[in-house]
Image (cartoon, helix red, strand yellow):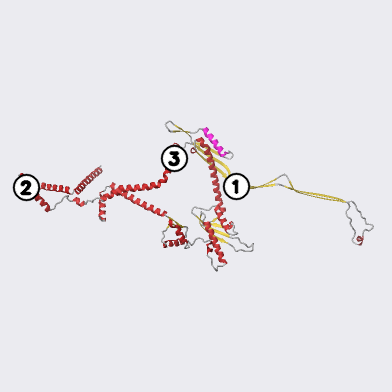
Amino acid sequence: MNVSEMVSQLTRLYEKLNRAQKAVIAGTLLAVIGFIVFLLLHNARLKDANYAVLFDRLSAKDAGLIIQELEKEQIPYKIPADGVIEVPKDRVYKVRLAVASKGLPKESHVGFELFDKQEFGSTDFDQKVKFLRALEGELSRTIQSLQPIQSATVHLALPKESVFVSKKTPPSASVVVQTVDDMRLSRKQIAGIKNLVAAAVADLTPENVKIVNEFGEPLSDSEEGESELVKKQIAYKNRYEKAYEDKIVNILAPIIGGKERVVAKVSADFDFAQRSSVEERYDPENVVRSEQSMEEKREGPGPKAVGGVPGAVSNIGPVQGISNASGKQKYQKSTTTTNYEISKTVSNIKGPFAVLKRVTAAVVVDGKYKEEKDGTLAYTPRSPEELKQINEIVKQAIGFNAKRGDQVTVSNFRFEDRALAEAAEPYNKVVNAFYSYVKPLVPVFKVLLLLIILYVFYKRIILPFGEKMMEIPIDETAESEPLLTFDEEEHESLTEKFTQMRKKVEEQLGLKEEFNEEELKYDILLEKVREMAEEKTEEFAALLNALIRDEAEIEQNAMAKVKEEKEKKS
């Protein structure tokens, strides 16, 4: 059977179908095509899962060189994103070592491996430049290994050593970092990078390390400090409020009938302005620090003195006529010095991290439920006395202070769908337990469901469709022709033979009347049909089936036309 005959048979078969059958076939074809597409996509996804990252964060130049090597070695690869190359998972490490042995990627930072090869004839300047490059590369690698950093570049400025202290210049460093998307460096991380670079270079201080991001914006631990402080303040406020809310719920849960029947929200206002002061206090009681005493005493005449006009007379000695009076002398002196110390107390007072200014609490409690005779739950609100007592309990729990402006509000409302939730709670427990046991078997169930769908599709669609296609086609042209045909010679011989036979019968029976020609043809045709039914039973049965089917289709078409005409008239 060639293709044209198959197409013609399919076309005739499709034309004989009604609208419902055509719709079923079209839906089946779409389902088959969708299922095939799903299998193809699933297989493609499985293939993608078998690939792993070979290198990432590659420059365009390095990526091109690595792809050339992979194509040269006929290694399959994929490029899911810019700068990322993937190869089959089972060949990642082998390919990575092979590519690295050829010096790829080339634009990565170099470190102290520069000194692995000794070069003869290199000057001291060359060695210094190599050391600077190696130190910068090692620092870049170290910073780049941090989690938020995608890439980093370090530049060091190392001045020449000088014997003069006054001319000594401190070293400095600059760092350019590029962070991962949707991530940023915190104050501690910036300070850590500064300390890391400063510790790796002699005489380098963290103040001389400057850090900028990929947009050229400077990053400083002091600038980031404000945002970090705000985060700490918000976290402190949330923890404080959450602790008070839990305290209120835990206190009221035994009274109300469960934690799910109490809702508490606390809002606390804090003053985060930290104030520091210096206080000096003097002790009014004096304390002797030191004491000095000096006493001087002289008694008797004083020493003789030679007096007079300078000259011979004074040098000769006592002269008659000059008075030499000598009297008694007594001298006494006493001095006391006492130093007193005034005691002083100096206190540096720093205010607390946060000062509580005001607390407000809103508490909502559920009412009471009583089971009726018909099994329903009747709701009863709580009395004002109970709400007042709950209000007092909440005030004691939060440390209520009226002078501070604290407020507490307790309300009673009916919690909606509580009865339904309680009724559904056992069901939910059973479902969760069942799901916990069934969850590990979900992949197996998926495979079984797929196999069942394929089996049903094969049995219900593919197999009947194949059997229909294997049936013997009935040619429409043959159906329009007469069922039995005879050529002229065969017809004449049969007619003559049958005439002779009839004449014999007439002579034997004594009948003289002529028989009708039409009746004779009918008898011959009937005899031929009987012989055909006896010799070719299967073909004759198929012929009868075709006749019956054609008559049924003719009747259906006639009924449909009559129905359409009635609908048009109505």
Q: Nearer the viewer, mark 2 or mark 1?
A: 2
Q: Which stretch is magenta?
A: 384-400
Is residue 300 on the magenta stretch? no
- Pick whichever of labels 3 and 1 is earlier in the sequence: 1
Chief secondary structure of the magenta portion? helix
Packing grade of label 2 (10 A; few <14, some 14-19, many >=20) is few
Examine the rendered structure and indicate whether residue 115 appears above or below residue 492: below
Question: Under tag 1, what secondary structure?
Answer: loop
**Disc 2 from disc 1: Cα separation:** 144 Å
Packing grade of label 3 (10 A; few <14, some 14-19, many >=20) is few
- Pick whichever of labels 2 and 1 is earlier in the sequence: 1
What residue sits right under mark 1 in the picture? 274
Residue 83 visible to an observer of this rendering: no
**Disc 2 from disc 3: Cα separation:** 101 Å
Q: Which mark is residue 508?
A: none
Amino acid type of the residue that numbered disc 2 sits on in the rendered structure: Lys
Quarter of the rendering containing residue 219: bottom right
What residue sits right under mark 3 in the picture? 429
Is residue 397 on the magenta stretch? yes
Examine the rendered structure and indicate whether residue 414 appears above or below residue 165: above
Examine the rendered structure and indicate whether residue 129 appears above or below residue 145: below
Q: Quadrant of the N terminus?
A: bottom left
Quarter of the rendering containing residue 161: bottom right
Question: Under tag 3, what secondary structure?
Answer: helix
- Pick whichever of labels 2 and 3 is earlier in the sequence: 3
